[in-house]
Amino acid sequence: MSLIVNINIISNNAPDDNTTISELGDGTRGIDGGAPRAYAQWISMQIKNLLGNASIKIQNADAKWGKFYKDGNKGDELSSGTINGIVIAPNFTSTVAACGRSSASSGTEGTIDLYDGTVRICTLYWNCPWGKKSNKFEKRNVNSNYLVTIGSWNSDSGAIGNVNIDVERY
């Protein structure tokens, strides 16, 4: 259930200056309703390292549409370089999150690669389009020496949501 609240602000400085701020039930906001629609398209990947004694490094982060953000704060954008700097220690979990942009009705689409040293474990791909009836989340190019287990996620319209990903060696 979504709750949208519209507040009209009339500036004292400009008699005809009306600005609408919208707020979605989850607290996201934006001017003229842009944020609720775009921010409603999101994914939060919780990647758990079960490799034993090796770290997992994220590389080649690419948000084709939308943006990466600090988990829990869609307004705090993270660069691809910051995402590429994530190293997940053995037996730890790290989160990579992406959403649509507040001023665009585009949703989010992108990829990240998971690496064990110089070996690519897999590519994770997501597409959470704005205004479409279905989402995609896929593991691609999985190295045969690794097991990548994807938990449940929302394939219907709206957010993909939280996705648990366990990575281990065979």
Image (cartoon, rainbow, N blue to C red):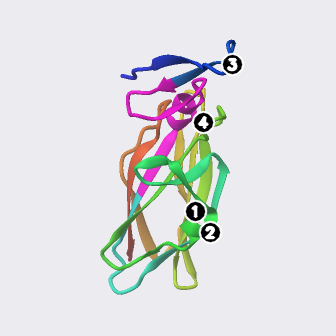
Residue placed furthest toward the top? 16
Q: How far apart are marks 2 and 3 (CA)?
A: 42 Å
What amino acid type is highlighted by mark number 1? Ile
Residue that badge 2 annotates: 81
- The stretch of residues the image draws in magenta is 22-45
Residue that badge 3 annotates: 14
Which tag, 2 or 1, sits closer to the chain's start? 2
Residue 40, percent from left and from top: 49, 34
Residue 3, percent from left and from top: 39, 21
Q: In which quarter of the image is the N terminus?
A: top left
Numbered disc 4: secondary structure: loop
In the rendered image, which quarter is residue 168 located in? bottom left
How many discs mark residues in the rendered view? 4
Look at discs 3 and 1 and give the one toward the viewer. 3
The residue sitting at 49% across, 18% down in the picture is 7
Above or below, 48 relative to 1: below
Q: Distance between the residues labelled 3 and 1?
A: 46 Å
Q: Quick check: 111 left or right of 22?
A: right
Residue 59 visible in the current orientation? no
